[in-house]
Amino acid sequence: MKGFTTLDRYVIRQLFVALAASTGGLAALIWLTQSLRFVSLVVDRGLSLRVFIELTSMMIPSFVAVVLPITTFIVTLFMYQRLAGDRELTVMRAAGLSPFALARPGLVCASFATALTFLLNLWIVPVSYRDFRQFEFQIRNKMAAFMLQEGVFTRVSDVMTVYVRERDHDGTLRGIVVEDDRVANSRATILAKRGTMLLVNDQPRVVLFEGSRQEIDPKTGRLTMLLFDRNALDLTSNKDSQVRYRDAAEMSLHELLSPNLHEVSNRDRGKLAVEGWRRITSPFTAFSFAMIGLVAVLQGAFSRHGNISRPLLAVVTVVALLALNLLLQNLASRNTALIPLILIEAAVPGLICAAMLFASGIGSSGSDVTRRLGASRDASPASR
C-alpha cells in the first residue's frame, strides 16, 4: 500500500481482519437461522444435502449487504477504542499526527465497505437472489420429481405424493403409487407396475404402464376404477405453479426506477422505487456509521481513565438511524415525495461527522498532549 505509513498499514490490517471476521461470522449466523426455513422443503422432496447448501448459499450475498454497514461501525469503533485504551492513539498524537492522519485507516476501511456494498446492491445481490428464486421454484415444481428415491414417499408438490418401490439403472421406475389431490374433493390413487420420467415443455411428467386409477365419490362413497396400459401424469401441482412471479429484490436497478407501466400496478410502483433508492443509498450508511465511530473515539479531550459515554452515544445514534431508515422506507413506499429523505438520512450523518472531525481540529497537538501527560505524571503519587 504505497502512500501509507507503517502506522497506517498497522491499523488498516487490524481493521480489515476484524471486518472480515465479524462480517463473515454475522452473515453465517443469519444464514444458519434463515436456512432452517428450507429444511422441510428439501427433506420432504427427498433432495440431498448438497442441494440444500447450494440453495441456501445463494442468499449469503444479501446477508452480507445488510450487515456490512453495521459491522463496519462496530469494527471501527472497537479498534479505535482499543487503540485509545492501549494509549497507542496518545503516542500517535504526541508524534504530531494530524486528525486526518489518525482517521485515515478508518476512512480506508469505510471507503472499502462503501464500494463493496455498492457492488453487492447493484449487481451481486440481484443476480444471486434471482438464481435463488429460480432454483427454489425448480425444487418445488420440477426437480423433486426427478429425485424420487426407492422406498420413500416423496412429496413432489403440495398436492401430490409419489412412492417408488424400485428404480433401475436405466431410470425405469417399478411399483409406483401416486396420491393425487389436485382436484378438490376428489382424491385419486394411481397404481402402476412401471414408469419412465420425462421432461415435456420444461415440466416433469411420468409415463405409467400397466396400472389403474382409483377414485372414491365423496357423495355416494362408490369406488371408480380405471385400468390403463399407458398413461402420462403431470407432476406439477397446477398451472399457476408453472409461472414464477419476480420479486423486487431480483430486479435490476433500471427496472426498479423505470418499471414497465403495463406490468406494474400503481400501488407497487412506490415499493419498487423505494427498493431502488435503498440500493443506492444504503452504501452511504457504511461510511456514515464509520464516521460516527471515529468521532466517538477521536473527538474530545484526552482521558487517562477512558470515556465510555461517547462510544455508548455512538451506538445509540446508529440504532436510531437504522430505525429511522426503516421508518422512512415504509413512509416513502406510500408517498414517493419522501424518497429524498432516505438519501439525506444515509449521507448527511457522515458529512456532519466529517466536519466535526476535521474542520474543528479535534484533539490536541503533539506538544499539548505531551505537556498534559507530563502534568499527569507529576500529579500522580506513584511518580513522587
Image: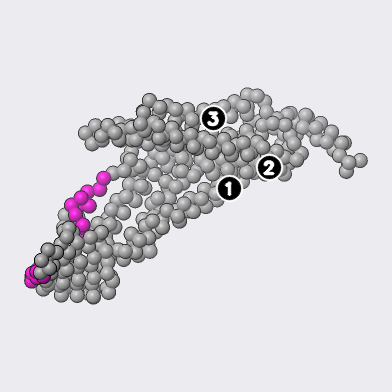
Query: What residue is shown at x 46% (from left), y 46% (from top)?
Result: 64
Residue 170 in picture, x, y percent from top left: 21, 72
Q: Is residue 60 left or right of residue 193?
A: right
Q: Determine if the magenta segment contains residue 239.
A: yes
Report whether residue 95 is seen: no
Residue 150, above or below 63: below
Answer whether residue 52 is magenta in the image. Answer: no
C-alpha distance separating marks 1 and 3: 24 Å
Q: Earlier in the sequence, mark 2 or mark 3?
A: 2
* Cα distance between the residues tagged 2 and 3: 24 Å
Task: Please tell me which residue is depicted at 25% across the width and 59% down the height of the picture.
Answer: 158
**Numbered tag placed on residue 83 in the rendering:** 2
Q: Residues within 10 Å of mark 1 (few under 14, many from 20)?
A: some
- Reading the image, the residue beneath label 3 is 349
Res 316 visible: yes
What's the amino acid at mark 3? Pro
Coloration mode: one colour
- Look at 31% across and 66% down and name the residue there: 46
Q: Nearer the viewer, mark 1 or mark 3?
A: 3
Query: Viewer-proximal residue, 349 or 321?
Result: 321
Q: What element carries label 2?
A: helix
Relative horizontal placement of residue 326, taking residue 214 as reference (left or right): right
Mark nearest the camera among 2 and 3 is 3
- Toward the top, the furthest residue is 359
**Chain-order first, disc 2 or disc 1:** 1
In this figure, which residue is indicated by the disc labeled 1?
A: 18
Which amino acid lies under the numbered mark 2 shown in the image of this protein?
Leu
Front one among 352 and 160: 160
